[in-house]
Image (tube, coloured by chain):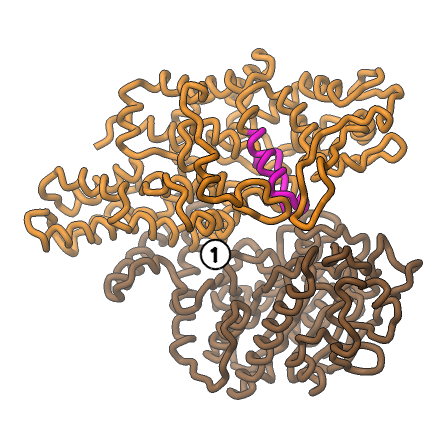
Chain colours: A orange, B brown
């Protein structure tokens, strides 16, 4: 059974990554919690995934233009196989915050580039990340900044930068939105080649000084010939930005909160935690790693097991990692990548710039059935390597009572703590067939089948919807 | 609430991606049609003429038959003001009736609640498709989301029937309400139990079904057949929803549109034949809609996003014919190069909700809209 250390490590890896097998958890627990947090915060110490390996078997990966190419399959493969789990989780975090969708951008290659940028810069300096974001062609097109001209201002990017990507509603006026938008005039992109029969080619950021409004602007009390960088600097200095980032990190990594539209009126469930994260953000000069270090080492994090309802991406990736066998980019990876979409999270295609609503809002009669059925289908397959590992661990007990079966399976699927009624139901279910052993071929087959069934039942529990 | 087989039923067939109105209902005597469609225009001799002004796309033969029988209403120029020409936004607007802000409640989710406020029948609304359509979403309102009717249910990975029944039984015990477990667990519990109940009810539908009608082997026909099976099983379903697509024909429109309309027309035709064979058609209407029409001038290979589109309502009780007017195709009358809508989509919804479903439309669509008299 899992020790306290392994249980805590399981919690860390579910949140800072997409979960891990028991073998990986035991290795990491042996290294120690703080050492593991440091390793997660230092992705460069771990090897990168080789995109060319994927491309070799899926040539559509490269420059699909308007065609979906591999869609989100490339990213799914990364999430399942990365040796840099926190880096990948932060990529998902930022994709949910800086939500940009392919249904408008209509350029899969540029959206992919944006994901790569988020991966590259997501654990660095937040201010630098905002600058990168302002220059990202997919984002420029998504929020119409290519239509933002000195003589015809378009406020879409300026507004969302303030409302959804930093300070949040209530911290600026409509005049500030206008002034910020004016400061970003001329920040546009151009295609390296015109759109052709095979679709779009690369978009490159370009700053057009002739299209920039060079006159005096006043934004949040500061005046001058402000340009986009200046707006971002001013915004980062505003305490509301620190709080905003802190609340997002809390909702994503610690425990489910109310959704963003309610933030102006509803205080955080743990004000002290938000204050600590926000202060760290400011003191570290917007260094994401510093904030994450404080977050993962905090008591409020360690005490929040199973307080986060898994997003569809987490449901799919964590079960694929648990059962194993998805390291090689085999055919079928495309179909697999549609599973989060069926569960309500079409990666690379959020419904709007507000992103997806998380927590309980992931659940409806359609999505719950998809989540349960997909997960059960995976963990019930005794031929999967990860399931084989679980069976072997159970087998090492020699014989197992009904209670032993239940407790061991709950342990290896988590460890998952359930209330006594739930445990009782599971024990009753296992009791209908008594003790199990592997002494003969037929008792082995029967044992394996019962394990498969128990794993499926556990994966269908309400408790299992959480991480 | 008594449920009889003859309560009014609505089937919604959503054409996802923006079906091209100009090439679906073709103003073949308007010279501007040919001027604007050098690449994708349908030659006049291929148009399926309805009257001396308009005709259908060449692959819509079976649908034209329904029109000629007087069982189809064409709503011209349907849309809404200030259309954003964006897929997700437009579809959201059609689904939630909220043109100005991001809505999360669907018009048919609200209708479901009106029809069955006490949740007496968890299959009041059934959708065929892998995920829940926003049009059907309302917190607390169960919707059966069917991917494949034959295998619909929880934990279908367990093949052996007896074993599965034991597991399902255990699942329903595990999902039962427990005191003090909190809002989210209760919600999960209720949602899970509703899905179980829905699967239990729906499983009889394919078992009870038999028909001489052969559906073509296409995804849309499969969905329509599923709808027909559930409808004929008399399970009290009042709202069905499915979609087909993608109609987003930015390039290579000709071949793409041909195939789409061939599949849809054959599927819809088989569906109505099937219902009529079983005397199950007279309480059913079908709404076919799309989130926007497409740009008047083609782009050399296809068409880009537009505004005004066409909607169709089909059924034995429909007052067939044309409603509203074909928007002007003159350049000076276009907006951003697109046909301007002249009837709000909520008018169409209102007719369906009030004159067919017997509900008050105002709270469901957010306003009072003039109702075209196709019912």
Q: Write the residue at 60% across / 81% down.
A: B283
Residue A29 falls in which quadrant of the image? Answer: top left
Which is nearer the eye, B40 or B13? Answer: B40
Q: Is residue B256 above or below residue A264?
A: below
The answer, for residue B51, to whether it is visible in the render is yes
Magenta extent: A95-118
Main SS class of the magenta portion in the image = helix
| Residue tagged 1 | A365
Q: Write the residue at 54% across / 15% down.
A: A280
Is residue A216 found left or right of A184 in the rendered image?
Answer: right
Q: Residue furthest right?
A: B332
Residue A415: image x %, image y %?
Answer: 29, 35
Residue B49: image x %, image y %?
Answer: 77, 81
Residue A162: image x %, image y %?
Answer: 71, 29
Q: Is residue A98 magenta?
A: yes
Which is nearer the eye, B221 or B274? Answer: B221
Q: Is residue B128 magenta?
A: no
Residue A58: image x %, image y %?
Answer: 47, 44
Q: Quadrant of the C terminus of chain A?
A: top left
Tally of marks? 1
Output the chain of dot 1.
Answer: A
Q: Write the residue at 23% across / 43% down.
A: A388
């Amino acid at each position: 059974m899992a020790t306290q250390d392994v249980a805590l490590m399981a919690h860390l890896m579910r949140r800072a990554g997409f979960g891990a097998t028991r073998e990986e958890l035991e290795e990491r627990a042996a290294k120690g919690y703080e050492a593991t947090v440091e390793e997660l915060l230092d992705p460069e110490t771990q090897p990168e995934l080789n995109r060319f390996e994927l491309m070799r078997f899926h040539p559509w990966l490269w420059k699909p233009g308007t065609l979906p190419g591999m869609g989100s399959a490339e990213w799914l493969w990364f999430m399942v196989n990365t040796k840099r789990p926190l880096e990948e989780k932060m990529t998902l975090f930022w994709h949910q915050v800086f939500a940009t969708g392919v249904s408008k951008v209509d350029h899969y290659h540029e959206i992919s580039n944006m994901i790569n940028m988020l991966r590259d810069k997501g654990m660095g300096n937040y201010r630098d990340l905002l600058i990168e974001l302002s220059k990202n062609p997919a984002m420029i097109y998504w929020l119409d900044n290519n239509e933002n001209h000195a003589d015809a201002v378009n406020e879409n990017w300026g507004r969302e930068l303030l409302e959804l990507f930093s300070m949040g509603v209530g911290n600026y006026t409509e005049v500030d939105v206008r002034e910020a938008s004016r400061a970003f005039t001329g920040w546009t992109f151009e295609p390296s080649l015109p759109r052709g029969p095979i679709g779009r080619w690369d978009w490159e950021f370009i700053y057009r000084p002739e299209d920039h409004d060079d006159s005096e602007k006043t934004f949040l009390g500061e005046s001058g010939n402000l340009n986009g960088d200046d707006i971002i600097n001013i915004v980062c200095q505003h305490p509301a930005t620190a709080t905003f980032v802190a609340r997002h990190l809390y909702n994503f990594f610690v425990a489910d909160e109310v959704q963003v539209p309610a933030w102006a009126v509803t205080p955080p469930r743990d004000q002290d935690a938000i204050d600590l994260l926000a202060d760290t953000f400011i003191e570290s000069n917007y260094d994401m790693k510093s904030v994450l270090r404080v977050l993962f080492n905090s008591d409020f994090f360690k005490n929040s097991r199973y307080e986060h309802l898994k997003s569809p991406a987490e449901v799919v990736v964590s079960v694929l990692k648990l059962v194993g066998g998805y390291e090689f980019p085999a055919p079928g990876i495309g179909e697999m990548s549609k599973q989060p979409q069926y569960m309500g999270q079409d990666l690379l295609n959020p419904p709007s710039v507000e992103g997806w609503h998380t927590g309980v809002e992931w659940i409806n009669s359609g999505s719950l059935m998809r989540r349960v059925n997909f997960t059960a289908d995976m963990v019930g397959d005794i031929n999967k390597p990860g399931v084989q590992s679980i069976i072997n661990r159970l087998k090492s007990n020699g014989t197992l009572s009904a209670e032993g079966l239940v407790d061991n399976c709950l342990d290896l699927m988590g460890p998952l703590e359930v209330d006594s009624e739930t445990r009782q139901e599971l024990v009753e279910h296992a009791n209908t067939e008594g003790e199990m052993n592997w002494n003969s071929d037929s008792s082995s087959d029967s044992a394996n089948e019962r394990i498969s069934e128990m794993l499926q039942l556990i994966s269908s529990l309400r408790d299992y919807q959480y991480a | 609430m008594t449920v009889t087989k003859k309560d009014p039923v609505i089937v919604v067939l959503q054409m996802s991606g923006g079906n091209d109105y100009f090439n679906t209902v073709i103003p073949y005597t308007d010279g501007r049609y040919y001027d604007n469609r050098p690449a994708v225009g349908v030659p006049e001799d291929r148009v399926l003429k309805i009257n001396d002004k308009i005709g259908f796309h060449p692959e819509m033969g079976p649908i034209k038959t329904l029109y000629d029988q007087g069982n189809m209403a064409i709503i011209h120029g349907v849309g809404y003001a200030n259309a954003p020409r964006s897929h997700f936004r437009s579809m959201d607007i059609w689904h939630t009736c909220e043109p100005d802000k991001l809505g999360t409640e669907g018009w048919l989710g609200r209708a479901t609640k009106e029809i069955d406020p006490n949740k007496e029948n968890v299959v009041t609304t059934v959708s065929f498709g892998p995920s829940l359509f926003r049009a059907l979403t309302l917190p607390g309102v169960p919707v059966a989301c069917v991917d494949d009717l034959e295998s619909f249910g929880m934990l279908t990975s367990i093949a052996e029937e007896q074993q599965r029944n034991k597991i399902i039984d255990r699942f329903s015990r595990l999902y039962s309400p427990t005191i003090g477990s909190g809002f989210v667990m209760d919600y999960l519990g209720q949602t899970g139990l509703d899905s179980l109940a829905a699967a239990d009810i729906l499983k009889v539908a394919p078992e009870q079904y038999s028909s001489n009608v052969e559906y073509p082997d296409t995804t849309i026909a499969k969905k329509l057949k599923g709808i027909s099976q559930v409808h004929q099983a008399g399970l009290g379903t009042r709202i069905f929803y499915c979609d087909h697509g993608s109609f987003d024909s930015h390039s290579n429109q000709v071949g793409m549109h041909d195939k789409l309309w061939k599949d849809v027309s054959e599927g819809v035709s088989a569906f109505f034949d099937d219902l009529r064979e079983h005397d199950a058609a007279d309480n059913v209407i079908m709404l076919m809609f799309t989130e926007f029409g497409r740009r008047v001038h083609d782009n050399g290979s296809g068409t880009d996003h537009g505004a005004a589109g066409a909607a169709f309502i089909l059924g034995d009780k429909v007052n067939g014919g044309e409603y509203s007017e074909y928007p002007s195709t003159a350049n000076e009358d276009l907006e951003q190069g697109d046909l301007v809508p002249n009837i709000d989509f909520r008018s169409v919804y209102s007719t369906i909700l009030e004159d067919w479903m017997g509900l008050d439309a105002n709270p469901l669509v957010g306003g009072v809209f003039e109702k075209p008299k196709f019912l």
